Image (spheres, helix red, strand yellow):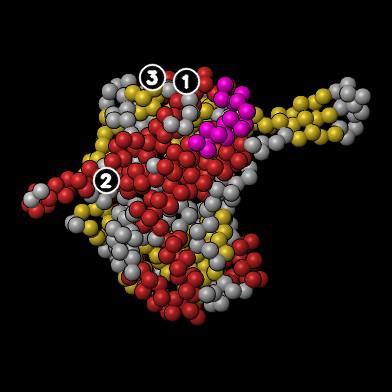
Amino acid sequence: MSPRLTSLLTPLRRTLSTRAWRSLVPEGKALIGGEWKAGSGSHMFPVFSPAKEEQIAEVPCASSGEDLDASIEAAAEAQPAWAALTVGARARVLEQWASKLEENTPLLAQLITAENGKVDSDARGEISSAIQQLRWYANEARATYGQVIPSTNVPGRRLMVVHQPIGVVAMITPWNFPLSMMTRKVGAALAAGCAVVLKPADETPLTALAAAFLATSEAGLDPRLLSILTSPREDADAVGKVFCSHPLIRLVGFTGSTNVGKKLYAAAAMHMKRVQLELGGNAPFIIFESADLDLAVSQLIASKFRCSGQTCVCANRILVQESIYETFVDMLTTAVGGLELGKHQGPLINKIALDKVALMVGAAVREGAVAAIGGKRASVDGRGHFYSPTVLINVAPNMSCGREEIFGPVAPIIKFGTEAEAVALANSTPSGLAGYVFSREVGQCWRVAEAMEAGLVGVNAGVVSTPEAPFGGVKHSGIGHEGGPGALKEFMNTKCMCWAGLD
């Protein structure tokens, strides 16, 4: 082959290889009521790459009343037989699904990078988390134990407590973890014996379709048990209303903004539906003067800049004791300077997100903050919704970047004096999802961790989420928990059966 022809074919081969994920996504179809098909209205909407700012696919608008009803009714029809299976049989399906995700890691990583923009290492980390979650839930399915309670006052009587699946559940998943947020919710519901109707984020529907394809075509899951209803943003409210009002839906699960979560909570309450809400975070990251600063910097980088700062548990307000402030800022700025766009940092999900971060940094600078590094829009090969990794100093707690969730690669550094001041600053927002404390003093770590108003606290650790631990927030950051030993109970009813006449 001539050198000229080789040079012409190389970009094409690269494009084809990075689009190999298409083999996992049935073209132009969603999983509706047990069938891969287009939506009833035959309309489509586009999916874009945030790194390249180009359309990569079209998916069906599967959000009509007909599509929703068909999916919910099919789930209700299939769920009793699924619940009647032994826990071992359900667990084996989840384990097989996990194995298929593992086998297809390279393709799934390409897909997540294509539609979400996160770098390859972050995408593979998400896939690993999804696999671990399914395997954890498979084990938990085998441990849904009941209880026998002796009667306190009546002879010959026993009280038997059992846990039964609640039925059909509706899930709405976010774009920042399109695979692991799906498996964390769906895996628990299926393990408990429920059926699921899921609406993925309109920015990242392809990953959910691919995961469902592997579950139903290769892992043995009845496709009626997992509908994937792709829908554009303008249909989100209508889908949410159906989820919250349909008589066959028993629980509504959602990960996303606090404002949307509150609306779903109110709508579900009108129909007495259970909710599981994982909402916004605004995590404080406290660094005391006794801390191991090398450890604190490395863990802050892992927490703050993973997925370009687009995680609900990432460090959002970095509180540094005044005696080490300058030293820490120098160390952090040096570390952030080593983050390379496209290799360590991906783009923000869309232009709206990019504009929000740019406006927040601009407002902080006008109010007196200084960008020690970064502080500007960026690109890779002239494209993408990138923002340069940023460290803001001279930040006051009342600035917007010190009060609101940033959801971008911006680290505002706030100075504090005493332990009491740090705790007060940490608890000064309505959010309460995650918090972090770094100190070599065990007593101080214990006091601050207990005082933090958060559902998860990392003590000398910047990444704390793991399948075997409960994940959930307090205050305005959510209701209920995902993961951990009690995860399946969220999807089960507790029934007490009183047996008399046993004497």
Above or below: residue 16 compared with residue 413: above
Quadrant of the rendered image containing residue 175:
top left
> Which residue was labeled with disc 3?
66
Question: Which quarter of the rendered picture does the C terminus lie within?
Answer: top right
Of marks 1 and 2, which one's residue comes earlier in the chain?
2
> Which residue was labeled with disc 1?
74
> Which secondary structure lies at badge 1?
helix
Above or below: residue 485 compared with residue 347: above
- The location of residue 266, given as percent across then percent down, is 51, 35
- The location of residue 152, given as percent across then percent down, is 88, 35
> Which residue was labeled with disc 2?
18
Can you tell which of label 1 and label 2 is closer to the viewer?
Answer: 2
Do the CB atoms of the residues marked 3 and 2 lie less than 8 Å apart? no
> Which secondary structure lies at badge 3?
helix
Total residue callouts: 3
**Label 3, residues with CA under 10 Å away: few <14, some 14-19, many ≥20:** few
In the rendered image, residue 137 lying in the magenta stretch gets the answer: no
Q: Is residue 178 left or right of residue 497?
A: left
Of marks 1 and 3, which one's residue comes earlier in the chain?
3
Residue at 49% in and 75% down: 293
In this view, the residue in front, 76 or 329, is: 76
> Which secondary structure lies at badge 2?
helix
Question: Residues in magenta?
Answer: 81-96
Q: Is residue 82 left or right of residue 263?
A: right
Do the CB atoms of the residues marked 1 and 2 lie less than 8 Å apart? no
In the rendered image, residue 89 lying in the magenta stretch gets the answer: yes
Residue at 74% in and 29% down: 496
Q: Is residue 344 left or right of residue 167?
A: left
Of marks 3 and 2, which one's residue comes earlier in the chain?
2
Q: CA distance from mark 1 to mark 2?
A: 35 Å
Q: Taking the image as drawn, is residue 403 in sight?
A: no
